[in-house]
Amino acid sequence: EKTLELFPAGVERMSVLASLARAAAVARDRLRFERAAVEADAMTERTPGGESVLYQLAEGARCFEQWDRANAWADRALELATASGNKSVVRLAGDLLVALSVREMAPAGEIPELGGPVDQLVDLVLRRLKKHTAPRDRRAVPPEQFPVY
């Protein structure tokens, strides 16, 4: 969520939102899922490359047993992926549609150990985000080229 301010628009923001939506769904955080999913879905209408985003949203909806919504997103993902030639999303969306047709539940997420690698990575990213804010001047060095300390 903290990285969203670095991506005000475009494919990058749409991808971050899709990742957030899927992660929130696996964690069964309905509020975060809905907020990220609604924005990401709207962006797929006007931003190319939305097939993987729609697939992630469909998987998220599956976590909440929103079968119709998951089907609609998976159908759109398959349609866009077929048109763009994205074979991996064609396969993933096709497999998901089969799973959805029999109401197969999403695999349960594992709970990472407290203070383990996941928490350490989150702490590291948050520390770096505090140190390096996004430049307001578009001519400045972009965040992905900031030096690593």
Image: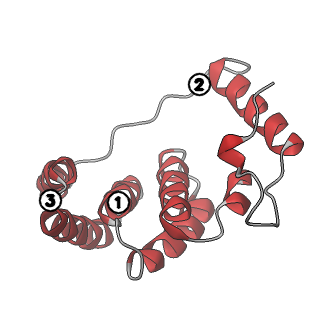
User: What amino acid type should be assigned to the residue bearing mark 2?
Assistant: Pro
- Residue 32's tag is none
Q: Quadrant of the N terminus?
A: bottom right
For mark 3, give the secondary structure: loop
Residue 91 vertical position relative to residue 51 in the rendered view, above or below:
above
Q: Residue 69 location in percent, x, y?
A: 32, 72
User: What amino acid type should be assigned to the residue bearing mark 3?
Assistant: Gly
For mark 1, give the secondary structure: loop
For mark 2, give the secondary structure: loop
Residue 52 vertical position relative to residue 68 in the rendered view, above or below:
above
Of residues 24 and 137, which is closer to you in this image?
Answer: 137
Q: Nearer the viewer, mark 3 or mark 2?
A: 3
Q: Which residue is mark 1?
A: 65
Q: Residue 127 location in percent, x, y?
A: 84, 35
Q: Say whether residue 137 is left or right of residue 96.
A: right
Q: Nearer the viewer, mark 1 or mark 2?
A: 2
Q: Pick out the residue farthest to the right.
A: 131
Where residue 46 sits, quadrant-wise, is: bottom left
Of pointers 1 and 3, the one earlier in the residue sequence: 1
User: What amino acid type should be assigned to the residue bearing mark 1?
Assistant: Glu
Of pointers 3 and 2, the one earlier in the residue sequence: 3
Of pointers 1 and 2, the one earlier in the residue sequence: 1
Q: Evaluate if marks 1 and 3 touch, with contact meaning CB atoms under 8 Å apart.
A: no
- Residue 85's tag is 3
Q: Which residue is mark 2?
A: 112
